[in-house]
Image (cartoon, rainbow, N blue to C red):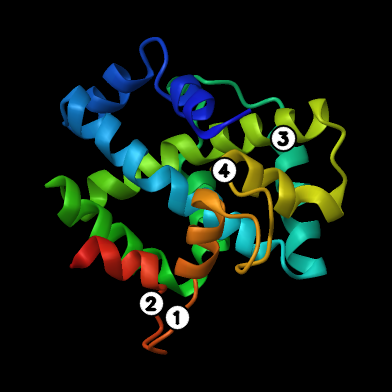
Amino acid sequence: MDLNSILGALTAGNAVNDMGKQFNLNNNQVNSIITSALPTLIGAMQKNTATESGASSLAGALASHLGDGINLSSANLLDGSKILGHILGGNSNSFISALAKKNGVSDGQASGILSAILPMLLGLLGKGQQSSNTGIGGLGGLLGSILGGGSTTQSSGGGLGSILGGAMADKNNNGVPDIIEGFIK
């Protein structure tokens, strides 16, 4: 499982077209939002696995979404919104605003797309965890390998995973992870 296969699964079939209709966007806008957000979302999940409670919480979420298919009609938008809050914490609104601005859509449209894909994303990640027989302690490495880094530490591993691990830091202590600020600039 890699980032491209997850992206392909989330945008396969009629999903993009259905989301476009639901949120009054064209297919290119929907694809752009998903493509822009996915590395940050997975990177934030990887960061959350740095603590035992974060890894345990993520493992529970992955297990509870194993049955979620790639089907917008069954997507629970309220659940997706809650998932976003758990993944990004207090930075959700900043991330949504930056993502919306970058893609020329409203905050509500960006939030809606994320809320639609997040239960499906957790289902895909849960299946990847299950098929690779990865335990709670290995979730950070699994997510890092999806991003191309394979490590939960910022100083090792290389690739996109390590870049995102460092970018999720808030080096200027303004309450917004550095990667989110990158969307705004």
**Mark-to-mark CA distance, 2 and 1:** 6 Å
> Which element carries disc 3, helix, strand or loop?
helix
> With respect to residue 65, does 94 lie above or below?
below
Residue 100 in picture, x, y percent from top left: 21, 52
Q: Residue at x 88, y 45 (%)?
A: 135
According to the picture, the residue beneath numbered tag 2 turns out to be 176
Q: Is residue 61 visible?
A: yes
Q: Do the residues bearing badges 2 and 4 touch, measured as CB atoms within 8 Å?
A: no
Q: Label 2 vs label 3: CA separation? A: 28 Å
Nearer the observer: mark 2 or 1; the answer is: 1
Q: Amino acid at mark 4?
A: Gly
Position of 104 relative to 5 (above/below): below
Whether tag 2 and tag 1 are in contact, CB under 8 A, the answer is: yes
For mark 2, give the secondary structure: loop
Pick whichever of labels 2 and 4 is earlier in the sequence. 4
Quick one: quadrant of the C terminus? bottom left
Q: Is disc 4 placed on a helix, strand or loop?
A: loop
Between disc 3 and disc 1, whose residue precedes?
A: 3
Residue 156 percent across, percent down from the top left:
65, 62
Q: Residue at horizontal 31%, vertical 58%?
A: 96
Q: Label 3 belongs to which residue? A: 126
Q: Which residue is mark 1?
A: 170
- Badge nearest the viewer, 3 or 1: 1
Residue 72: horizontal and vertical position, in percent? 44, 24
The residue indicated by pointer 4 is 148
